[in-house]
Image (tube, coloured by chain):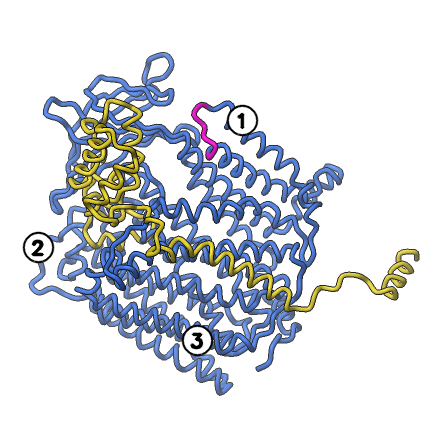
Chain colours: A blue, B yellow
Amino acid sequence: MVETGHFALVLAFALSLVQMIVPLFGARLNNQRLMAVGGPVAITGFALTALSFAALATAYANSDFSVASVWENSHSLQPMIYKITGTWGNHEGSMLLWVLILTFFGALVAAFGSNLPATLRANVLAVQGAIGAAFFLFILATSNPFIRLNPAPIEGRDLNPVLQDLGLAIHPPLLYLGYVGFSICFSFSVAALIEGRIDASWARWVRPWTLVAWMFLTGGIAMGSYWAYYELGWGGFWFWDPVENASFMPWLAGTALLHSAIVMEKRSALKIWTLLLAILTFSLSLLGTFLVRSGVLTSVHAFATDPARGVFILCILTLFIGGSLALFALRASRLTAGGLFHPISREGALVLNNLFLTTATATVLVGTLYPLALEALTGGKISVGAPFFDLTFGPLMLPLLVLVPFGPLLAWKRGDIIAASQRLMAAFAVALAAMLITGLFIDGASVFAALGIGLAVWLVAGALTDLAVKSGVGSAAPAVMVRRFAGLPRSVFGTALAHLGLGLTLLGIVATLSFGTEKILTMRAGETVELSGHTLRFVGLYPAQGPNYSEDRGRFELIGVGGSAVGEISSAKRFFPVRQTTTTESGIKTLGLSQLYISLGDEAKDGSVVVRLWWKPLVTLIWGGGLVMMAGAAMSLMDRRLRVGAPSRRRKQASATAPTVLP
Amino acid sequence: MKARFSAALLVLMLALGFAGMALAVKPDEMLADPALEARARALSEGLRCMVCQNQSIDESDADLARDLRILVRQRLVAGDTDQQVMDYVVSRYGEFVLLKPRFDLRNALLWGTPAILLFAGAIFIVLSARSRRPVSTALSSDEQAALDKMLRD
């Protein structure tokens, strides 16, 4: 099975070369048969990669320690779920997952792209093939997961204990679906540049792909944030860590792309910019892969001492980013600019959105790379941490968030800012009230807290106002209103939900940062502690034995008003003997939208234990908002014009709209 | 070293082999005076644990981070202002220890980027909007007449 997987991987590499070359020449020569090669090759390539991945997963499930990667990252006593998720819990396996998803998306274009112009489809598949070829070669040359050991070791070295968590099953696949999903937008852009034209079908295809990738990336980041929150044991949810930034940059750029693609689809304006954004978004995904995979983040020197992988990815990075940008520079002037619009219009609002989002992306990029560049150039070492991003990213987001509710209420082409403001009066009043209530009536509320809560409520109320206005609240009879509401396009709901989710996330962040409380103390069994109105009693420490670890579980009772226990929370310290490491299992009790969070520290000789407690008000909204944003994207995807029944009409429209540019 | 999980690709990162975690600030380190302790915590959040990956000493349970936390508290008890504490720590450990880089010439590009880009972007947008044909919205007298006629009918 392992050799089958290895062989399938090599074969998939060979097919990706075919996929890269043959359709491209077919499109050049306008040869239908050569172009038609792309589809079946892409689908077969995906099948082979899936086979290869299945082979590796089987080796992991069976604890086949003759495979080096399995030996290094698995153990026979691990629960089955962690044996399987361990497949991608390491460098080699995660890269295989990366190409699996890449070929999956390529196969989707091949399978459902029959309504695309033949040359565009061929070029898109060729570009996908080129990305695939580069990464297959990377895996085979520097990170082969199928290397065997002889003689085979008896026992494995265990998966890193902090990864032995359900989060590993969900977070990386979601994240990669997002990361790699943007490759399709990239391939479409490069294909459009190769052809030298963008037509209507281009925009109709790119937008749903952007939505899909963005939805998964949002989920991946939210899931990762929650995982870090409960696994790390100190209750932080975002750290501005370079590795986090690596995924956040494509998200920011992808969000900008999502918005500019709307303008392009609806008004055929901002074409060149959308194309560039699509290239940049995937370039940032590649950059993220490079930053994380090369080890350059730990230190420039660590990178220099073991450069094989890093240099390889750097070459891929240079080739694709440099190549696509060079192509853009050569060809972009051939594409005509699209429709005109007044500065105050939906288009204008979306341009402003793009200005702020791309500046924010660049800020995160500079903050992440500056220390590396400085060290490489001058040898000086500086750190760029959370305080920097709070001071730069924060002020950039502020005006953007204030403006969000206006966007959907402005008309295309020429909007009426006064009318939009009038419609938002109610939302503004609610936000102002929230701000005043927070500032005046909640103890210890800072100006930041009041403004933040007000802004979050403004976003939520603004999103609801959008729906209300569009279903005619205030101007139509109730029955008409309901009918209109039900008849609104799904994409309108999508926009409202996404903006609502953003507001909820902001509310969670502000509430947790401003009103969260913390206590650090030493406790003995039987003692109680009070935190923000909640009383907890420490019941005691209980040792227990897990499949591949031993733990000390500290049990706490939540005491109700009457003095009796109304709930239990337990937090544990786990010791994994194989890797000789200790992890903290935080204890979390969700009360409404808020959480009590307990983390255990060291046990003293006299039996007392260091305990750290947090009250995190509305903290679940941070990730709940992310889920709502995902729901918004899903809703938009279900919009009638993107649904499966639409292709026939879409094709008619596509052929009816003349290509905008001729070479 | 405490694991530096991150929301993104942390899986991949952790191939590096970070593991183990416990609590950072311990009760025995904390100062009795709540005002001083609050200042110590605030300062700690801006100081990097030198042996960790992008982690503040407030979050880290590495020995070095503990030493630094205690050092910060000693300086505060001795009566230093926040700025004096920071200067003292930087004089001993270098600028690397600051999570917020200084505003100086070396970091000009770092701090300047957001403002420069926002400004340049705004100028670019205004210029490219101007270079295009302005949107003509007023109706010509003939069009107005035709419209009036249609509305009347």
Q: Visible in this render: residue B67?
A: yes
**In which quadrant is the N terminus of chain A drawn?**
bottom left
Mark positioned earlier in the residue sequence (3 or 1): 3
| For marks 2 and 1 on the same chain, the one whose residue lies earlier in the sequence | 2
Chain identifier of the residue bearing label 1 in the image: A
| Residue under the point 55% across and 28% down | A436
Query: Where does the C terminus of chain A fall, quadrant-wise?
Result: bottom right
Give the structural element (helix, strand or loop) at label 1: helix
Q: Main secondary structure of the magenta part?
A: loop
Left or right, B13 with reference to A443: left
For the residues tagged 2 and 3, is the chain the same? yes
From this view, report whether residue A394 is shown above or below residue A646.
Answer: above
Cα gap from disc 3 to disc 1, whole angstroms? 54 Å
Q: Which mark is residue A437?
A: 1
Query: Left or right of A639: which side holds A279?
Result: left
Q: Which mark is residue A326?
A: 3
